[in-house]
Image (cartoon, grey):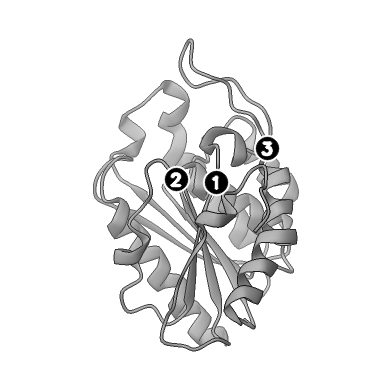
């Protein structure tokens, strides 16, 4: 693929499920420098899974600029709109053409800021993504809950899987400690829009159980896709 600004297109990788080339596709947002163990997490999943690494975690995945979470920390760049346009307009068509895929449905999944981006993509691209998984998502992000309150899309026939570690609300800078309350608010708003929502509170903090949370999210999406066809 040609060089792009926000997504490492050459780093995209397809992990084939058991469902064949017409199976739904789950796009998993990832980071090149500290990749998640997507290969371990896809065990038993029938859908196709595509790993999508972004170039700059803090800039590519945040929906608008915001101050860093600690004094002296780099500010967030707020380039999610551009990243999403690149994903839907260039990366997805190129990946599916290269591998001969013709999915009836596409869904998106991410962890931390990747989870925030997955939920953002779900709200902005309802015709592209029928479901999302927001895993330990950074829904504490400044302005996010107010955004979702205003722009929660029609959720009829759509599905969101939200998960968090029960210790996440106890650690990190003060802005992050509202994360479970904010995630519960997101779940309520999505349900209010007609979306089917599963909210799971599991063990550990934000830095633990990455692969287990990712595997659980992928399996939940896979099961939902099997139900809805």
Q: Is residue 16 left or right of residue 167?
A: right
Distance from Cα at disc 2 to Cα at disc 1:
7 Å
First-in-chain label (2 vs 1): 2
Q: Nearer the viewer, residue 220 or 26?
A: 26
| SS state under label 3 | loop
In the image, is residue 152 above or below residue 5? below
The residue to which callout 3 is attached is 79
Q: Callout 1: few (<14), some (14-19), or many (20+) C-alpha neighbours within 10 Å?
A: many
Q: How many marks?
A: 3
Q: Nearer the viewer, mark 3 or mark 2?
A: 2
In the image, is residue 143 above or below residue 183? above
Q: Quadrant of the C terminus?
A: bottom right
Q: Is residue 152 visible?
A: no
The residue to which callout 2 is attached is 32
Q: Nearer the viewer, mark 3 or mark 1?
A: 1
The residue to which callout 1 is attached is 54
Q: Nearer the viewer, residue 152 or 228?
A: 228
Picture coordinates of residue 33, whole percent (x, y): 41, 41
Contact, mark 2 vs mark 1 (Cβ under 8 Å): yes
């Amino acid at each position: 693929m040609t060089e792009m600004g926000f997504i490492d297109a050459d780093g995209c990788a397809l992990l084939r499920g058991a469902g064949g080339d017409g199976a739904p596709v789950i796009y998993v947002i990832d980071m090149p420098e500290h990749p998640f163990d997507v290969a371990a997490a896809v065990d038993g999943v029938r859908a196709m899974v595509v790993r999508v690494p972004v170039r700059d975690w803090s800039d590519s995945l945040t929906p608008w600029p915001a101050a860093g979470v600690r004094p002296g920390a780099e500010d967030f760049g707020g380039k999610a709109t551009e990243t999403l346009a690149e994903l839907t307009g260039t990366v997805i068509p190129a990946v599916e053409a290269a591998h001969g895929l013709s999915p009836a449905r596409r869904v998106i999944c991410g962890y931390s800021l990747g989870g925030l981006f997955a939920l953002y993509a779900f709200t902005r691209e309802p015709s592209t993504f029928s479901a999302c998984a927001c895993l330990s998502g950074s829904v504490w992000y400044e302005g996010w809950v107010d955004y979702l309150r205003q722009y929660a899309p029609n959720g009829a026939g759509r599905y969101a899987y939200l998960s968090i570690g029960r210790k996440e609300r106890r650690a990190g800078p003060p802005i992050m400690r509202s994360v479970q309350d904010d995630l519960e608010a997101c779940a309520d708003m999505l349900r209010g829009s007609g979306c089917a929502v599963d909210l799971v509170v599991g063990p550990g903090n934000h830095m633990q159980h990455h692969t287990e949370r990712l595997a659980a999210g992928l399996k939940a999406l896979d099961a939902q896709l099997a139900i809805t066809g």
